[in-house]
């Protein structure tokens, strides 16, 4: 018997679908959460047979299970571990493991793309255009490359998975990949996806008003309680709040924290590693441990949500050479002024602060982190400038 243990997200489910395409009814696919994998693998190894084949994809095993798998491999058992998270790179020390984070051309890998290559190289699966596109859509979604490429088809594929059971999604994908020359959504799927898109927009809009900020260790985190659309929400909040190092989305139901960052100099897998988690540099997750609960929930609970920056401004826009106006609850308005040398200075309560900032990004980061300031609407900006002009004329 062939056994596959894989993740229950799109990348993991993609591996399950490929396994069923390759091995048909000879494979038993087990979809696991991050927390349940090691229990499932340990339970299986208690009665595993040497003639069985064991595949593990998109999730990492702990040291004890790695030793058991290695022992079974040395007895002649067929073991193949495939992953793309850098937190699993140490397992490359075993002959049955392949962990690869990126391809030679710089593209990030996914478990589905690596497993597909393994199945093709070993003649377990026959390539076609539909399967190739399906695999690439999953790779782009899982690595967030779809956002850079504006490949919304990849995002819609992930949305479709979470709109139905894994079993129904499997059935639909297996039919598409077995009978069509290309990969596409049918009319019913398109209608469902369009409805889901509207729901997601409303959800993201609501969550934007709930985010709070807090310094956790050396990083500034944006914290929000959320249980849906986590990748989209983390990316959206990160883009709208670039002064924050990463976004932490707390799911109290499953006691997990999802971490996302848009910054190249922040590795959220390191943050996740402190709380029994791991993942990618820009997308990771961890358990809501007692320490994590204290830092992200208990200590942040009294804090007020951030005020959103004004949108659709024409005059009060960031980096304006005429100055940019922000407001705050603690110290009132901040007027950010560019200097002749290209640096930026802060005027607060009609007094110019001595400190100079090298860029607008740096001065905005300072007032947002220190005073939770927000960009005001054009009307307030114009009134502020008019009042200051009046004062200058009367002096």
Image: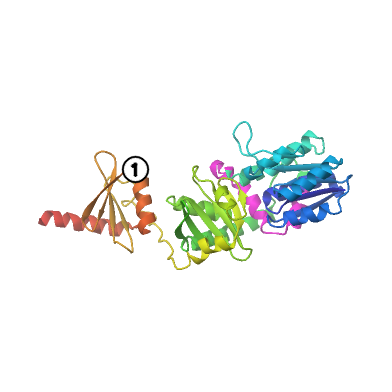
- Please give the residue where the numbered disc 1 appears in the rendered image: 359
Residue 148 appearing in the image: yes
Above or below: residue 164 compared with residue 345: below
Numbered range of the magenta stretch:
145-174
Is residue 376 toward the left or the right of residue 193 in the image? Answer: left
Q: Nearer the viewer, residue 261 or 98?
A: 98
281 and 92: which is toward the camera: 92
Q: Is residue 373 visible?
A: no
Q: Is residue 158 magenta?
A: yes
Q: Position of residue 37 (x, y in %)?
A: 73, 54
The residue under the point 48% across, 67% down is 301
Instruction: Measuring from the top left, give residue 313's x and y in whole percent.
Output: 35, 53
The colour style of the image is rainbow
Q: Position of residue 136 (x, y in %)?
A: 66, 41
Image spot of residue 148 (x, y percent):
54, 42
Q: Residue at x 66, y 54 (%)?
A: 160
Prevailing SS of the magenta stretch? helix
Quick check: 361 above or below 161?
above
């Amino acid at each position: 018997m062939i056994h596959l243990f894989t993740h229950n997200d799109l990348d993991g489910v993609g591996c399950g679908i490929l396994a069923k395409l390759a091995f048909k009814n000879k494979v038993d696919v087990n979809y696991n959460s991050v927390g349940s994998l090691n229990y499932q693998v340990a339970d299986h190894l208690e009665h595993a047979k040497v003639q069985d084949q064991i595949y593990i994809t998109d999730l990492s095993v702990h040291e004890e299970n790695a030793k058991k798998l290695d022992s079974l491999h040395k007895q002649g058992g067929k073991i193949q571990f495939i992953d793309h998270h850098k937190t699993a790179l140490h397992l490359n020390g075993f002959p049955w493991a392949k962990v690869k984070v990126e391809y030679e051309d710089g593209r990030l890998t996914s478990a589905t793309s690596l497993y597909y290559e393994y199945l093709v190289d070993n003649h377990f699966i026959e390539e076609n255009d539909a399967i190739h596109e399906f695999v690439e859509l999953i790779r782009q979604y899982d690595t967030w490359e779809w956002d850079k490429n504006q490949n919304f088809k990849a995002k819609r594929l992930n949305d479709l998975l979470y709109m139905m059971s894994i079993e129904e999604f499997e059935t639909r994908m297996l039919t598409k990949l077995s009978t069509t020359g290309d990969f596409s959504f049918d009319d019913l799927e398109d209608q469902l996806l369009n409805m889901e898109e509207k729901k997601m927009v409303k959800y993201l809009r609501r969550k934007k008003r709930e985010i709070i900020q807090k310094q956790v260790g050396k990083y500034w985190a944006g914290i929000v309680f959320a249980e849906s659309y986590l990748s989209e929400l983390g990316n959206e909040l990160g883009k709208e709040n670039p002064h924050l190092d990463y976004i932490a989305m707390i799911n109290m139901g499953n006691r997990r924290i999802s971490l996302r960052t848009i910054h190249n100099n922040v590795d959220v897998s390191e943050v996740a590693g402190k709380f029994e988690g791991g993942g990618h540099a820009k997308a990771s997750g961890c358990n809501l441990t007692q320490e994590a609960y204290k830092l992200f929930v208990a200590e942040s609970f009294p804090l007020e949500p951030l005020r959103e920056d004004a949108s659709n401004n024409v005059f009060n826009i960031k980096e304006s050479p005429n100055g940019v106006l922000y407001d705050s609850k603690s110290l009132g308005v901040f007027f950010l002024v560019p200097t002749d040398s290209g640096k930026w200075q802060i005027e607060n309560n009609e007094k110019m602060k001595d400190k100079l900032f090298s860029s607008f990004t740096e001065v905005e980061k300072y007032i947002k982190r220190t005073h939770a300031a927000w960009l005001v609407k054009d009307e307030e900006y114009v009134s502020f400038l008019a009042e200051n002009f009046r004062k200058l004329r009367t002096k």
